[in-house]
Amino acid sequence: MQDESIKSVSSRPVYPPVEININAAYHLFITEPSASSKVGNLLQQTAAKTHQLIESDNIEELKLQLTELIGTLPLATSVYLAGRETYMWQVYAVLAELGFIKEQIEMLTPTDNSRTVFCCHCYTQTHQVAAAPFECEGCGLPLTVTDHFSKRLGSYFGFQVNAEAKDELPAAEAF
Amino acid sequence: MTDTFKVTVTDIQTVASSIKEFTLSPVEGQLIPFSAGSHIVVEMPTEEKTYKNAYSLLSQPDDPSHYKIAVRLQDNSRGGSVYMHTQVKVGDSLTISAPANRFAPLWQAKKHILIAGGIGITPFLSYLPEFERRGEDYELHYLYRGGQTGAYCNELSEQLGDRLFCYDSATSPRCNIENLMSQRAPGTHFYICGPEKLIEAVMTTAKQLGIAAGYIHFEEFAAPKPGNAFELELKSSGRLLNVSEEESMLEAIEKSGIEIPNLCRGGVCGQCVCRVSQGKIDHRDTFLTEQERSSGDVIMPCVSRAAGERLTLDI
């Protein structure tokens, strides 16, 4: 009797416009250094509230920094992320590990259309892929890229294009 | 349909003036282990109808030799708790469902704050051994009315020490929900089991403090409330059923011999969802989304009712 209408099979995240959560007790901004201007407007709105901006593109360092910081943050903290899609999801994973929940984490529109792609043949992740098919950095196979997105890895699922007729490679198309 | 099996009542203890604890042992073999927060549905056959009430399991989740449930004699009982309190004797056999869980702890949480109101302590009793085993960080806040609903206080205090906070409305100050919820670190989750008023108080405080709703988890007492009587038409067969004031739609359908998959019987799990082809709905569940509610074409027959005199189900 369960109604199983599946509206969409795509797991590709969508990024609606981000607004400041006025109820939050603390506002934490984490961005790639090149993307810090993206949160300028939001930062301005929180000028009178307790907030902090962290600019870092080193996930390992960021992890240490956040682990130390978390003891001082209230439960009612809102986090805003800006940068490439894969970067935001990597930070998301670090935050989730520290106990943050989805509702507390807002992501701005990714700064470019590039994708990180997970190869289902050799498990390598190729970064900054701008068009598909492309050559996997791990096994060299030409991969097509799906809209299947892993939030844990921040990667899209890729598999060998035209495996049945390897010589017929379609022209690459930008995302 | 979910599996049912027979158990024997091997012990009945009065643990507070309005609460009895029942020990249920398997008629043969062993029971199945369950996860922390699980409940079973107990069938209570009476002459007029068979009551089916969900009760949290409060015994050790990994002990298959018996289950324990605690039943509070409800002020406005529809019959279930009266039946358990007055009809059931040691040695009787009962039919129960397999355990199901709509209220499991979140193991990603960094700290668990349990808030129990009276008989709402029951699901948390199965959390505790599991928390100890895993070395979880937790607190139990127990609100009750002295003598009447404050079962298990002494043994809990022995077991939990300073993790237990008791609030006896007869003798001690009221629990200050705001103090309880503020000054918490990210990753702290709150679980509430108790009356609606308590759940609302926690939700309101969370909102005021800016705490995300995803940190709040609750299990409402699962009991359909009575309403107006109405006529129910089943589209496929054209059958007409009468749903009385004291009866849920699901019960009326079951009485007519039709089985609908169901688990919680309290508007939470979503198993018994049915399509509605005609009639206005009085939605009383916590499962359907706002969109589904306003569409007017789905209903949870375990708790929801017709808003008018007639409803047609597409079954």
Image (tube, rainbow, N blue to C red):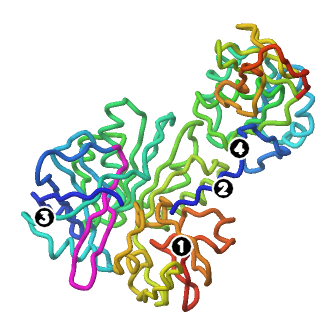
The amino acid beneath tag 1 is Arg
For mark 1, give the secondary structure: loop
Q: Are marks 4 and 3 in contact (CB under 8 Å)?
A: no
For mark 2, give the secondary structure: helix
Same chain, marks 1 and 4?
Answer: no
Vertical comparison of B20 with A74: above or below: below
Same chain, marks 1 and 3?
Answer: yes
The disc numbered 2 marks a residue on which chain?
B
The amino acid beneath tag 2 is Gln
Which residue sits at x=24%, y=43%?
B60
Between label 1 and label 2, give the one nearer the viewer.
1
Residue that mark 2 sits on: B208
* Residue B95: x %, y % from top left: 21, 63
Q: Could you tell whether B255 is left or right of A130 in the image?
A: left
Residue placed most toward the observer, A87 or B26: B26
Distance, label 1 to label 4, CA atoms, is 34 Å
Between label 1 and label 4, give the one nearer the viewer.
1
In magenta stretch: residue B48 = yes
The disc numbered 4 marks a residue on which chain?
A
Magenta residues span: B35-55
Between label 3 and label 2, give the one nearer the viewer.
3
Residue that mark 3 sits on: B93
Which residue sits at x=70%, y=26%?
A157
Distance, label 3 to label 2, CA atoms, is 49 Å
In magenta stretch: residue B199 = no
* Residue A14: x %, y % from top left: 79, 41
* N-term mark: 1 or 3: 3
